[in-house]
């Protein structure tokens, strides 16, 4: 029998403090260096570093599920121009008869990984999905967002920035979502919230471990804490360019899930996993700049915002009903839009009212921004930011009410209402593409049909096990 002692292995493991230095430097260079130069430098590094065994490439499907493929380092370096995968195995990508898709490595997205979370000897990069003929694949919204923001910068000099406040719950047992039963529900690991968790209880240890990992990956975490509801958490990372912000959201959720799994627990990003407590949101802070000037700021403007920012807000408000299916993309998400739990269900803007779908945080010339609160943590972040940009810049403006106390409109109350509004709107098809609109609708109708039309007071098994971040092929085939 062969000796499998771990001492025989010599794979890369980097201390957290050194990881943070390396990833922060890489993040800075991503913004200032030509992608071709970075590709050459990382190729040289991978050839030289013998302790790296695999490179993980990541991409996201149309609903927001995160997919990862591990490539042998030598194979990747030799075959990076011809990486293919079966697109028909990814829900929302190609049909079986046209299955082959390509992956193009986004070399500037290179990140060194904490080995206790991802395993030793691995680094990660994101990949763009291309069609067989190497044209951009229209259902890869990371790539669509990348193309749109590149054009925006080249034509108008505008750069989009974002950061999210992505909340989740920590619950007992591994695989708690897949084994969910509506009669017993999820079992909370903590009864406290905000400042009521002890320094070394399970929730606090989970938050600490997740935050440490994310800081080491260059996220620039600003604060990490339990949230209002029991067993709820929120880790906030730094404001950055929109593509990187979305990448960080996907890695953030992955890290949290793995840390929880290591502790024998489950981190869930379902918007409302537990009835009668506050749900989880992904408040999306957003602004645009030009020549390093914040286009959303105006010192003497209404609530400190420029007219440019107000026009952006009024377009989002005007198209709020039909875009709700993008921002709240699951059956469970509509439980969260309950006004009794600080829910942002009103189609209005306010600097103070947290029931409004858009809030205006206090800011200055550097930090002025808008906060879209009606985004659930299970939404596809690339699709969310792409939609915000396209609607905010190209949509039709709402006529601003003269009195903010005017009767408010409300977001759809169920996914069925959201589907109906999404389906009937022509503008959605123009900026998403008709093919993507049809695909997205099909998957949302599939899951809506598997759940009762009325949400009721109890979280249903169907809305959990058929959720796009939870389901697997076995569940769908046994329906």
Image (cartoon, rainbow, N blue to C red):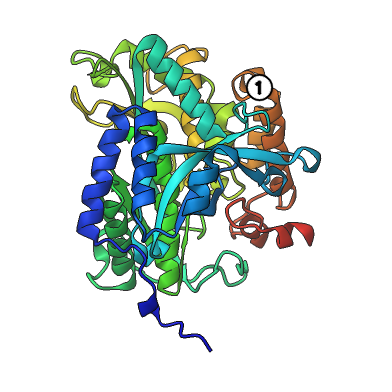
Where residue 136 sits: x, y (%)?
A: 59, 28
Where residue 353 sits: x, y (%)?
A: 34, 34
Q: Nearer the viewer, residue 111 or 186?
A: 111
Locate residue 177 relative to residue 152 in the image: left or right.
right
Q: Residue at x 45, y 75 (%)?
A: 264
Where residue 180 sits: x, y (%)?
A: 60, 67
Q: Residue at x 25, y 36 (%)?
A: 28
- In the image, is residue 262 above or below residue 424? below
Crowd tier of the residue under label 1, counting other residues whose Cα lies within 10 Å: few below 14, some 14–19, many 20 or above = some
Q: Nearer the viewer, residue 354 or 122?
A: 122
**Residue matched to label 1:** 429
Q: Secondary structure at mark 1?
A: helix
Where residue 124 sits: x, y (%)?
A: 42, 50
Q: Is residue 188 visible?
A: no
Q: Give the quarter of the image for residue 434.
A: top right
Q: Residue at x 31, y 58 (%)?
A: 213
Q: Residue at x 54, y 68 (%)?
A: 176
Q: Nearer the viewer, residue 248 or 35?
A: 35
Q: Most extreme residue toward the bottom, as rendered?
A: 1
Locate residue 131 relative to residue 292 in the image: left or right.
right
Locate residue 199 relative to residue 463 in the image: left or right.
left
Q: Most extreme residue toward the right, as rendered?
A: 97
């Amino acid at each position: 029998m062969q000796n499998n002692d771990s001492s025989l292995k010599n794979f890369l493991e980097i201390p957290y403090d050194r990881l943070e230095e390396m990833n922060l430097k890489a993040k800075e260079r991503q913004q200032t260096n030509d992608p071709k130069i970075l590709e050459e430098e990382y190729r040289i590094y991978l050839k030289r570093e013998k302790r790296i065994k695999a490179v993980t490439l990541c991409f996201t499907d149309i609903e927001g599920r995160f997919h990862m493929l591990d490539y042998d380092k030598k194979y990747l370096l030799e075959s990076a121009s011809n990486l293919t995968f079966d697109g028909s195995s990814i829900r929302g990508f190609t049909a079986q008869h046209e299955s082959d898709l390509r992956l193009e490595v986004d070399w500037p997205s290179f990140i060194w990984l904490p080995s206790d979370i991802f395993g030793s000897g691995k680094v990660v990069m994101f990949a763009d999905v291309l069609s067989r003929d190497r044209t951009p694949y229209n259902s890869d919204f990371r790539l669509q967002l990348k193309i749109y923001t590149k054009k925006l910068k080249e034509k108008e000099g505008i750069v989009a920035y974002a950061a999210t406040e992505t909340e989740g719950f920590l619950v007992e047992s591994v695989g708690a979502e897949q084994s969910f039963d509506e009669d017993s529900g999820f079992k909370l690991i903590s009864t406290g919230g905000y400042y009521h968790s002890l320094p070394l209880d399970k929730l606090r240890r989970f938050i600490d471990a997740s935050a440490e990992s994310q800081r080491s990956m260059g996220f620039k975490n600003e604060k990490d804490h339990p949230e209002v509801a029991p067993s709820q958490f929120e880790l906030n990372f730094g404001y950055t360019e929109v593509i990187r912000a979305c990448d960080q959201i996907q890695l953030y959720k992955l890290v949290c899930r793995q840390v929880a799994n290591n502790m024998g627990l489950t981190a869930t990003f379902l918007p409302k996993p537990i009835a009668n407590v506050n749900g989880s949101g992904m408040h999306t802070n957003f602004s645009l700049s030009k020549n390093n000037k914040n286009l959303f700021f105006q010192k003497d403007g209404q609530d400190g915002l420029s007219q440019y920012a107000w026009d952006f807000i009024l377009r989002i408000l005007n198209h709020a009903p039909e875009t709700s299916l993008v921002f709240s993309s699951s059956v469970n998400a509509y439980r969260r839009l309950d006004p009794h739990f600080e829910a942002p269900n009103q189609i209005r803007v306010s600097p103070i009212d947290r029931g409004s779908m858009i809030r205006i945080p206090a800011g200055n010339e550097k930090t002025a921004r808008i906060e879209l609160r009606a985004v659930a943590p299970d939404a596809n972040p690339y699709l969310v930011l792409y939609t915000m940009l396209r609607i905010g810049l190209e949509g039709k403006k709402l006529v601003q009410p003269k009195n903010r106390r005017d009767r408010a409109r409300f977001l759809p109350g169920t996914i069925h209402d959201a589907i109906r509004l999404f389906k009937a709107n022509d503008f959605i098809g123009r900026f998403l593409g008709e093919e993507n609109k049809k695909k997205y609708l099909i998957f949302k109708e599939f899951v809506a049909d598997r759940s009762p039309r009325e949400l009721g007071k109890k979280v249903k098994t169907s809305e959990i096990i058929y959720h796009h971040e939870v389901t697997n092929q076995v569940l769908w085939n046994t329906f």
